[in-house]
């Protein structure tokens, strides 16, 4: 089986006025289809930079990244955006929902980039919200939902386009312990249904509960 994510000797440097900061230093890793992986590290460890590169939101300074077999360095911005939209569903700590849109409209939004007809988009979005237990909250706006419900909307948005990869950045960071357990249970169900799950976290408990754990510190992977 070929890896769905194949990172080879990637480094990422940020230049400031006076010096260069090395956020990632010669990182290599492989993640295989259908796996459940956590990437754990402290603040400043490089895990957010690694997440941005995995999600094609940033490019490495050097090294190679193959996403589902495609060398992302060879793709122009429109092609990369299409690949990202098709391959990766994002879940963020702060939910990143549009405040003036309903739950249904928020889930529909990424599907508009695929130029699907409105009735098909709506059907897919409703089905995604049903999967996360929010069939009765379709027309609620984010401010009318609890934190856990908002994260469920974000998960529905991530899975609506059936991407093979779900990339979750601190998905339970703003939730209480009950909601945290519910969201982690949802992610495990998505894994069981065939999604590749990648969770970025600083929470040791979440990482220790994962079958695959990658530890990052000072821009280097020292355990995987």
Image (spheres, rainbow, N blue to C red):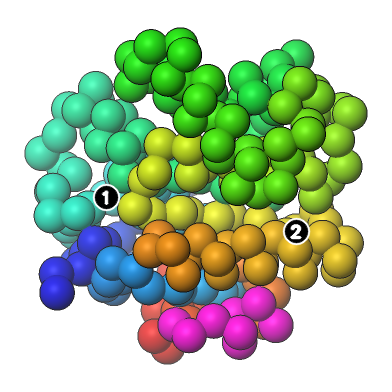
Q: Residue 43 location in percent, x, y?
A: 65, 65
Q: Residue 200 location in percent, x, y?
A: 55, 63
Q: Where does label 2 land, which residue?
A: 173
Closer to us: 166 or 19? 166
Q: Residue sitting at 75 percent across and 63 percent down?
A: 182
Q: Which residues are magenta?
A: 205-212
Q: Looking at the picture, does residue 210 appear above or below residue 90?
A: below
Q: Residue sitting at 78 percent across and 34 percent down?
A: 136
Q: Residue furthest top?
A: 118
Which of the 4 image quarters holds residue 153? Answer: top right
Q: Residue 123 location in percent, x, y?
A: 50, 25
Q: Residue sitting at 82 percent across and 60 percent down?
A: 179
- Quarter of the image with the N terminus is bottom left
Q: Where does label 1 land, which residue?
A: 61
Q: Is residue 223 magenta?
A: no
- Asked whether the viewer can see residue 85, the reply is yes
Query: Is residue 136 rendered to the left or right of residue 156?
Result: right
Q: Residue sitting at 30 percent across and 29 percent down?
A: 81
Under circle 1, the secondary element is: loop
Residue neighbourhood size for the residue with mark 2, other residues' Cα within 10 Å, grouped as few (<14), some (14–19), many (≥20)? some
Query: Is residue 23 rendered to the left or right of residue 45?
Result: left
The disc, 2 or 1, on the residue closer to the chain's N-terminal end is 1
Give me the C-alpha separation between circle 2 and circle 1: 29 Å
Closer to us: 63 or 128? 128
Which of the 4 image quarters holds residue 202? Answer: bottom right
Under circle 2, the secondary element is: loop
């Amino acid at each position: 089986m070929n890896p769905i994510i194949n990172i080879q000797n990637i480094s990422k440097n940020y230049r400031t006025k006076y010096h260069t900061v090395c956020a990632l230093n010669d990182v290599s890793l492989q993640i295989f289809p259908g796996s459940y992986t956590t990437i754990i590290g402290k603040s400043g460890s490089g895990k957010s930079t690694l997440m941005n590169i995995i999600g094609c939101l940033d490019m490495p300074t050097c090294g190679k990244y193959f996403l589902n077999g495609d060398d992302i360095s060879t793709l122009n911005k429109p092609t990369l955006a299409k690949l990202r939209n098709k391959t990766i569903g994002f879940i963020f700590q702060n939910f990143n929902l549009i405040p003036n849109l309903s739950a249904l409209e928020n889930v529909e939004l990424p599907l508009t980039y695929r130029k699907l007809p409105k009735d098909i988009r709506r059907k897919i979005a409703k089905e995604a919200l049903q999967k996360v237990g929010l069939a009765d909250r379709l027309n609620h706006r984010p401010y009318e939902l609890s934190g856990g419900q908002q994260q469920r909307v974000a998960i529905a948005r991530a899975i609506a386009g059936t991407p093979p990869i779900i990339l979750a950045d601190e998905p339970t960071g703003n939730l209480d312990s009950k909601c945290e357990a519910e969201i982690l249970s949802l992610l495990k169900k998505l894994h069981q249904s065939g999604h590749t799950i990648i969770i970025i976290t600083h929470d040791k408990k979440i990482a220790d509960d994962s079958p695959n754990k990658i530890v990052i510190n000072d821009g280097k992977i020292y355990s995987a």
